[in-house]
């Protein structure tokens, strides 16, 4: 296999706070090939956003501590200077954020904001940049881009602002697009539009995409591979099919079971994961999911390694053997379905 | 069929309208336009059932909920609760009614006063309605905390000491304090993480069974609504476009908007997700200040014809008779054609059957 586009090796991020050290990311590793889409799933506080913000070197908190390597096209991003990083950010790696309401500057016209971004990374006249901005707005499906380019962000709806963000992200045809919950603030019909747009642009530009989300449905729709995060660590990682049809980690089972889904008969009760996510200051010893896990046994007092136990690059961090997991999985995800068949 | 004298009907909304005026001027204020947030909506809620209210942001579902509970005054129409019109009652006359219906709000961070202890928050409704002395109130608060799955010792803590899911439980406990009959839950789980969401939904389920509650469950998540609801009303731009028993709505949507909405929900199953045909609606929801003529959905509808721009389709019964939809070109009627009312008769068709 050729060299991956991005390789994150044992990334650790912690923040010193008054209450203690928050271990937001506790050793995350993953790779991403060119043109691939990786979905990162997890709940709030699982460290998925912090991981990607660290990759982009966008955390400037003096209390933050970083460890590990982020190899992008052979360069370690963690060792680059601010200026070097600025060049990469926006031109080679672009990012879309969750909240399209706050990620645009309200006092500048939309077109100005897009062309500023282009002019930052390319030697190009103002007029040409403006023309590019119009083209981009058209490409992301904004009607009448020629007129809308001079509007302010508040003239746009949420879905359209997210389109503007995508237009900005694409202005320099990046090799990697990081989308942090790009559709969470949007309605389902608008979400469908935006996801289709990301898919189409991925095909047109051949960009690799990292999509951070908490919605398993979105992942199933758009990702090639998926990493599930819990309490600052990746607990399971594999292809989309591995994850949805052969999930290995009890937390993934919990996530799959707790969705009220439209494609299955409705269960009488949803399978809730008991308890709360742990505090990142005082992480439980051993497996972080242990205290909430119904399958806990003695071995879970040791921290489980993220290793390939079933083969084919499908990694998971759970002490249960693959056989045990196979026996328990269906009852864990759909207790009622298996009751009926029994 | 919806019979007016049905004894089971706990609440009826009759042609409810809520317009918000847009005013210009400081001294000489004059109205320049109106936001048609809820426009002529009628529905019934039967005792013991859960009515789901779905729609995208700005469709008026929350406003309708607030109109029903009289947090908003109506612009027109009436709300009949237990056979009594409450839409024109004075504040004072409304008080005893308020005991019977309570609300659970979306944002568990904003809906609890951060400076009050949890015990006080839950006790407030009891004090306002003079439900017993201090000892009795304290006992009831502890009962309530236990009921929603919190420890009675949490009484003296402040909201910030709780997680989102726990806060929502506190909000539920507060709503239950006065033994209400009807709970209006406005997006009660959308601010919560998936795993916590399932906990709160299961809690609401259990409470309904235990306390014989009636719910109006407002949400934009179609999966969650399907899970909790007996019947579902779909709203678009201030109008109800379809009302149906829950399962039927998902099996055979009649209104093209419902069809599109359902097809836009991502399915957590990669194979199914790649196989199914997705209807992607073009554009955004139009402005409720100047809603489109005729059927409000027609500019985005792929089945729209001339009549859709001219005549507003009435909400009429299809199929089982419990399935109402407002569309000139209803879908999925093939399965049960005999029972459907020809809807192109439009104006002459009865408003309600």
Image (cartoon, coloured by chain):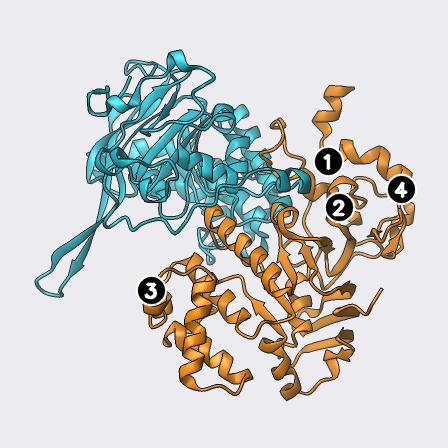
**Quadrant in the rendering for residue B143:** top right
User: Left or right of B258: which side holds B269?
Assistant: right
* Host chain of mark 3: A
Q: Which residue is mark 1?
A: A333
Q: Which mark is residue A155?
A: 3
Label located before the other in sequence (1 or 2):
2
Q: Which residue is mark 4?
A: A322
Label located before the other in sequence (1 or 3):
3
* Chain A shade: orange
Q: Quadrant of the C terminus of chain B?
A: top left
User: Left or right of A233: which side holds A17?
Assistant: left
Q: Secondary structure at mark 4?
A: helix
Q: Position of residue B167 (x, y in %)?
A: 54, 48
**Of marks 3 and 4, the one in the foreground:** 3
Against B84, is A66 above or below? below
Whether residue B158 is visible here, answered yes or no, is no
Q: Which mark is residue A243?
A: 2
Label located before the other in sequence (3 or 4):
3
Label located before the other in sequence (2 or 3):
3
Q: Position of residue A124 (x, y in %)?
A: 49, 86
């Amino acid at each position: 296999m050729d060299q991956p586009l991005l390789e994150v090796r044992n990334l650790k991020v912690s923040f010193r706070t008054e209450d203690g050290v928050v271990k937001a990311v506790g050793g995350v590793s993953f790779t991403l090939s060119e043109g691939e889409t990786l979905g990162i799933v997890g709940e709030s506080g699982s460290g998925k956003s912090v991981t990607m913000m660290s990759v982009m070197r966008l955390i400037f908190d003096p209390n933050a501590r970083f460890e590990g390597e982020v190899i992008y096209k052979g360069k370690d991003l963690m060792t680059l200077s601010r200026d070097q990083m600025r060049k990469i950010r926006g031109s080679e790696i672009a990012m879309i954020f969750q909240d399209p309401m706050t990620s645009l500057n309200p006092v500048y016209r939309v077109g100005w904001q897009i062309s500023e971004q282009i002019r930052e990374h390319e030697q190009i006249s103002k007029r040409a940049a403006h023309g590019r901005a119009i083209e981009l707005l058209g490409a992301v499906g904004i009607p009448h881009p020629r007129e809308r380019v001079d509007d302010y962000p508040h003239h746009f709806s949420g879905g359209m602002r997210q389109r503007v963000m995508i237009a900005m992200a694409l202005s320099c045809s990046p090799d990697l697009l990081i989308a942090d919950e790009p559709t969470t603030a949007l309605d389902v019909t608008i979400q469908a539009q935006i996801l289709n747009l990301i898919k189409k642009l991925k095909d047109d530009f051949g960009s690799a995409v990292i999509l951070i989300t908490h919605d398993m449905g979105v992942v199933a729709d758009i990702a090639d591979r998926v990493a599930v995060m819990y309490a600052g660590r990746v607990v399971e990682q594999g292809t989309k099919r591995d994850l949805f049809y052969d999930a290995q980690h009890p937390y993934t089972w919990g996530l799959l079971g707790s969705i009220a889904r439209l494609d299955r008969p409705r269960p009488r009760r949803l399978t809730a994961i008991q308890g709360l996510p742990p505090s990142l200051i005082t992480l439980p010893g051993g497996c972080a999911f242990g205290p909430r896990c119904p399958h806990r046994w003695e071995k879970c007092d040791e921290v489980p390694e993220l290793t390939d136990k079933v083969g084919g690059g499908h990694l998971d961090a759970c002490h249960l053997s693959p056989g045990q997991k196979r026996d328990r999985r269906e009852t864990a995800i759909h207790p009622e379905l298996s009751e009926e068949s029994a | 069929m919806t019979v007016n004298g049905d004894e089971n009907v706990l609440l009826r909304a009759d042609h409810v309208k809520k317009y918000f005026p847009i005013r210009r001027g400081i001294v000489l204020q004059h109205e320049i336009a109106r936001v048609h947030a809820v426009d002529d909506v009628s529905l019934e809620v039967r005792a013991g059932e859960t009515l789901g209210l779905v729609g995208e942001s700005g469709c008026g579902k929350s406003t309708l909920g607030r109109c029903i509970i009289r947090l908003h005054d109506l612009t027109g129409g009436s709300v009949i609760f237990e056979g009594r019109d409450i839409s024109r009652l004075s504040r004072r006359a409304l008080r005893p009614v308020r005991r019977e219906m309570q609300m659970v709000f979306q944002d568990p961070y904003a809906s609890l006063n951060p400076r009050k202890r949890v015990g006080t928050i839950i006790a407030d409704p009891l004090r306002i309605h003079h439900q017993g002395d201090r000892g009795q109130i304290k006992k009831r608060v502890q009962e309530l905390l236990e009921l929603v799955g919190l420890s009675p010792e949490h009484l003296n803590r402040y909201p910030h000491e709780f997680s989102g899911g726990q806060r929502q439980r506190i909000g539920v406990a507060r709503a239950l304090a006065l033994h209400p009959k009807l709970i209006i839950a406005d997006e009660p789980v959308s601010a919560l993480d998936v795993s916590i969401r399932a906990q709160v939904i299961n809690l609401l389920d259990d409470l309904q069974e235990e306390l014989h509650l009636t719910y109006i469950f407002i949400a934009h998540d179609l999966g969650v609504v399907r899970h909790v609801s007996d019947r579902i009303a779909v709203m678009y731009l201030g109008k109800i476009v379809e009302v149906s028993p829950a399962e039927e709505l998902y099996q055979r949507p009649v209104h093209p908007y419902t069809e599109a909405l359902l097809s836009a929900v991502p399915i957590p199953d990669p194979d199914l997700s790649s196989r199914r045909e997705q209807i992607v609606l073009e554009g955004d929801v139009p402005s409720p200040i100047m809603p489109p003529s005729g059927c409000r959905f027609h500019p985005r509808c792929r089945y729209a014809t001339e009549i859709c721009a001219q005549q507003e389709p009435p909400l009429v019964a299809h199929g089982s008779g419990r399935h109402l939809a407002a569309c000139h070109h209803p879908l999925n009627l093939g399965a049960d054609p005999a029972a459907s009312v020809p809807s192109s008769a439009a104006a002459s068709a009865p408003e309600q059957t």
